[in-house]
Image (cartoon, rainbow, N blue to C red):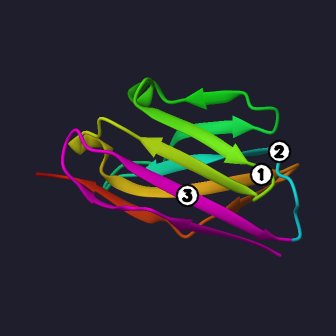
Amino acid sequence: QVQLVESGGGLVQPGGSLRLSCAASGSVSRFNAMGWYRQAPGKQRELVAAIADGGRTNYADSVKGRFTVSRDNAKNTVYLQMNSLKPEDTAVYYCYADYYITDYWGQGTQVTVSS
């Protein structure tokens, strides 16, 4: 059994920053890929950023240059540093981790960018 627990969401003004964390616990000691999706009201869930076990990263075009994904394998934790936040970044952010053919998901954390 694997559990992903997110933290760090909240309300921030446009131009501000937030850092999301997602800690994994359970039967998998090292995941293939970890990362973040988000889902805004009325929209489909979309990939925000991902990081492979070897460190290769992938970002949505809309967040390139503003968001940074990283991971600490010793802590089985993935992070998302979000800078220069915009109102359109408002969404529920979900962390995920995959181990071969199985995907694991966090419960989601709300990020609201508003003045």
Taking the view exactly as shown, the residue that stands out farthest to the left is: 115
Alpha carbons under labels 2 and 1: distance apart: 6 Å
Q: Residue visible at 86% across and 51% down?
A: 101
- Residue 98's place in the image compared with 5, above or below, is above
Q: Estimate how packed mark 1 is, as few (under 14), some (14 to 19) or many (20 or more) residues with alpha carbons within 10 Å.
A: some
- Residue 107's place in the image compared with 15, above or below, is below
Alpha carbons under labels 3 and 2: distance apart: 18 Å
Residue 104 sits in quarter: bottom right
Marks 1 and 2: in contact by CB < 8 Å? Answer: yes
Q: Please tell me whether mark 1 sits on a helix, a strand or a loop.
A: strand
Q: Please tell me whether mark 2 sits on a helix, a strand or a loop.
A: loop
Count of marks overlaid on the render:
3
- The amino acid beneath tag 2 is Asn
Q: Residue visible at 42% across and 31% down?
A: 63
Q: Which residues are magenta?
A: 1-26
Q: Residue visible at 47% across and 43% down?
A: 81
- Residue 110's place in the image compared with 79, above or below, is below
Q: Please tell me whether mark 3 sits on a helix, a strand or a loop.
A: strand
Pointer 3 residue: 21
- Residue 113's place in the image compared with 64, above or below, is below
Pointer 2 residue: 32
Q: Nearer the viewer, mark 3 or mark 1?
A: 3
